[in-house]
């Protein structure tokens, strides 16, 4: 199977932290498992760290550190070539910039309305759509 090149929006990571049995946790695990490849930028890692630490989420420090270390160990860092002004929420442009630099197949988000349906060859999809795409490859 050809590796899937993926970028994950922060809301997927937060949901994965808050709901251990949730769909987003499965998405996160699959994104860090071959043949998939998870791509991040320094800005995305900083946002992950900042958002996971927000008091309103009440995510234990140990879990935050564990998730961030897993992502660092199982992702590929890319440097965007240029800044974009495409997303409805300006903070979300960094995910399109990462997708652009990584030539990602999918950007997985819980906020599709903030993004165009496609950015170049990257399709913006939900967790459920991602699972429906990869599930057939796990059934023997």
Image (tube, grey):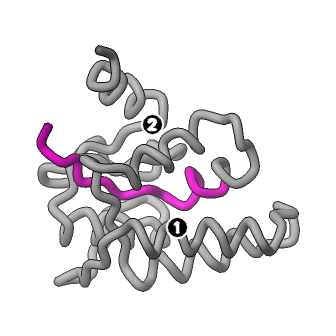
Viewed as shown, does residue 66 lie left or right of 58?
Answer: left
User: From this viewpoint, which residue is outermost toward the front?
Assistant: 140
Q: Quadrant of residue 54?
A: bottom right
**Quarter placement of the N terminus:** top left
Identify the residue at image location x=61%, y=65%. 67
Crowd tier of the residue under label 1, counting other residues whose Cα lies within 10 Å: few below 14, some 14–19, many 20 or above:
some
Q: Answer whether residue 26 is magenta in the image.
A: no
Q: Which residue is mark 2?
A: 126
Identify the residue at image location x=45%, y=36%. 126
Q: How many marks?
A: 2
Viewed as shown, does residue 12 lie left or right of 58?
Answer: left
Q: Position of residue 95 (x, y in %)?
A: 37, 65
* Magenta segment boundaries in residue numbering: 1-14
Identify the residue at image location x=48%, y=36%. 127
Asked whether disc 2 touches disc 1, contact meaning CB atoms under 8 Å apart, the reply is no
Identify the residue at image location x=75%, y=75%. 53
- Please state which of the two labelled residues, at mark 2 or mark 1, is closer to the viewer: 1
Which of 126 and 78 lies nearest the eye of the viewer?
78
Up/down of 7 relative to 123, above or below? below
Assign a secondary structure to mark 1: helix
Up/down of 90 relative to 117, above or below? below
Up/down of 73 relative to 57, above or below? below
Q: Position of residue 13 (x, y in %)?
A: 58, 56
Crowd tier of the residue under label 2, counting other residues whose Cα lies within 10 Å: few below 14, some 14–19, many 20 or above:
some
Assign a secondary structure to mark 2: loop
Q: CA distance from mark 2 to mark 1?
A: 22 Å
Q: Which residue is mark 1?
A: 70
Q: Position of residue 96 (x, y in %)?
A: 31, 64
Which of 92 and 28 lies nearest the eye of the viewer?
28
Q: Earlier in the sequence, mark 2 or mark 1?
A: 1
Q: Quadrant of residue 86?
A: bottom left
């Amino acid at each position: 199977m050809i590796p899937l090149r993926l970028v994950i929006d922060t809301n997927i990571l937060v949901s994965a932290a808050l709901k251990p049995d949730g769909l987003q946790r499965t998405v996160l695990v699959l994104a860090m498992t071959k043949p998939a490849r998870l791509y991040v930028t320094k800005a995305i890692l900083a946002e992950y760290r900042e958002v996971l630490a927000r008091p309103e989420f009440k995510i234990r420090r140990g879990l935050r550190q564990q998730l961030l270390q897993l992502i660092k160990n199982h992702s590929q860092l890319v440097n965007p070539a240029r800044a974009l002004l495409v997303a409805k929420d300006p903070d979300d442009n960094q995910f399109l910039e990462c997708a652009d630099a990584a030539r990602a197949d999918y950007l997985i988000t819980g906020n599709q309305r903030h993004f165009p349906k496609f950015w170049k060859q990257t399709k913006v999809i939900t967790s459920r759509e991602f699972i429906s795409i990869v599930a057939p490859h796990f059934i023997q």
